[in-house]
Image (cartoon, helix red, strand yellow):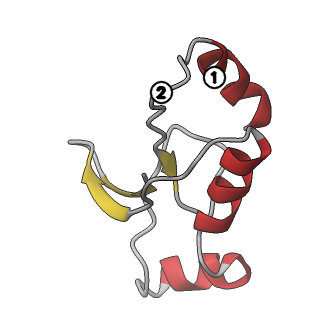
Amino acid sequence: HIIFSKKPIKHLQNDGYLYLEVPIEVLKPDTIINDALTKKIKLTVHEHINKYTTKSLIACARAHKLEIIDIQVEDVDLQWCISKVIR
């Protein structure tokens, strides 16, 4: 995520804004297979390989000396699945 962020940040003006939206990390990776099989969670396919937490997104922003204005976790309808994201 650090490499991804460098290019857009280079184009920011001093008073500019960078909007980030990333897929949220599965909360219990050790039980994900069982939870999906028993339908405790709805496991959707997402095009991203990396998953983030609110903490990791904050760390990424701070590593690039960005001021965080707001963070939200939301469900987004991608038409082919409902995906939870951090904005």
Name the residue at 30% across, 61% down.
Answer: 75
Name the residue at 54% across, 52% down.
Answer: 68
Q: Residue 8, relative to residue 18: is it above or below?
A: above
Q: Residue furthest front?
A: 14
Where's the N terminus, which quadrant?
top right
Name the mark on residue 72. none
Give, as a three-letter code, the residue at label 1. Ile
Q: Residues within 10 Å of mark 2 (few under 14, many from 20)?
A: few
Left or right side of 66 for 17: left
Q: Nearer the viewer, residue 20 or 31?
A: 20
| Secondary structure at numbered mark 1 | helix
Q: Residue 37 in the image: x percent, y percent?
A: 50, 80
Q: Nearer the viewer, residue 86 or 34?
A: 86
Q: Nearer the viewer, residue 52 or 67?
A: 67
Name the residue at 53% across, 84% down.
Answer: 35
Q: Residues within 10 Å of mark 1 (few under 14, many from 20)?
A: some
Location of residue 82 by image quarter: bottom left
Q: Residue 40 in the image: x percent, y percent?
A: 43, 87
Which residue was labeled with disc 1? Answer: 9
Left or right side of 39 for 59: right
Give, as a three-letter code, the residue at label 2. Asp
Left or right side of 46 for 54: right
Q: Residue 39 in the image: x percent, y percent?
A: 40, 83
Q: Residue 13, relative to residue 81: is it above or below?
A: above
Q: Residue 14, relative to residue 36: is it above or below?
A: above
Q: Nearer the viewer, mark 1 or mark 2?
A: 2
Circle nearer the N terminus (1, 2): 1
Q: How many marks?
A: 2
Which residue was labeled with disc 2? Answer: 15
Question: From mark 1 to mark 2, how far is it between C-alphas?
Answer: 12 Å
